Amino acid sequence: MSSASVQFLKTRRSQKLVQAPGPSAEQLEQMLAAAVCAPDHSALRAWRFVLIEQKHIGTFADLAIGATRRSGREVTEQKEQNTRKWLSSVPLLIGLAYKISHDNEKVPEIEQTLSMGAAVMNIQNAAHMMGFSTYWSTGLGTYTDEVPEALGLDTLDYRFVGFLAVGTPTVQLPPAQRPDPATLTTTWQP
């Protein structure tokens, strides 16, 4: 990989405010192909992606807001308005989950979780390389049973980890402030 590629990768940042156009079918296929290149101990192929197109996002918002309230979590009127306003311009949401391999002693669930996180990061990096922005949200009823189940993901068998909003950035954000990796790194010596 060239130094320029790494420099470009370092410019990726989450951006909540996205708009149409979203990725084409071919671009989305490439993003998902990148996702399944994530590390996958024992080739579990546990990743699951549920596409929610713009024409269905309003209906999905109704479901998610209602499910969150029914679960006992507060959704203020202001939060509901802000959520609906945000979602009204999002061209694509991707529901994110992985199938839990309950009886696999070789691959504990934490490794399955990490594999899902790596798959999502691959989607985010691929989207960035195509000029799109993404935002990983764990709101929208992520921690209810109702929302994943409405998306076809039985919560006994799948761990739901949120949604990825994908689209064209509405504004150009300044570079993110990143920590110096040296402050997070040590060298072990016996």
Image (tube, helix red, strand yellow):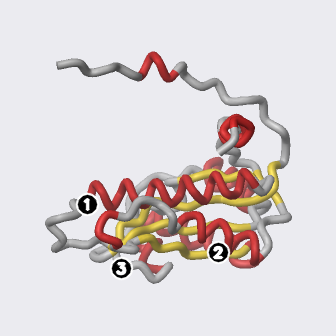
**Amino acid at dot 1:** Glu
Residue occupying image coordinates x 44% and y 73%:
148
Classify 10 Å Cα crowding around label 2: few (below 14), some (14-19), many (20 and above): some
Name the residue that disc number 3 marks: 154
Q: Secondary structure at mark 1?
A: helix
Quarter of the image with the C terminus in it: top left
**Is 100 placed left or right of 175 in the picture?**
left
Badge nearest the viewer, 2 or 1: 1
Per the image, the residue denoted by label 1 is 109
Position in image of residue 151 (x %, y %): 50, 79
Residue type at tag 3: Asp
Image height of 3 relative to 83, above or below: above
Q: Residues within 10 Å of mark 3 (few under 14, many from 20)?
A: some
Secondary element at image label 2? strand
For disc 2, the marked residue is 52
Q: Earlier in the sequence, mark 2 or mark 3?
A: 2
- Residue 51 drawn at (x, y percent): 62, 75
- Along the line of sight, which residue is nearer the eye, 94 or 8? 8
Locate the N terminus and report the quarter of the image it occupies. top right
Residue drawn at point x = 67 percent, y = 29 percent: 176
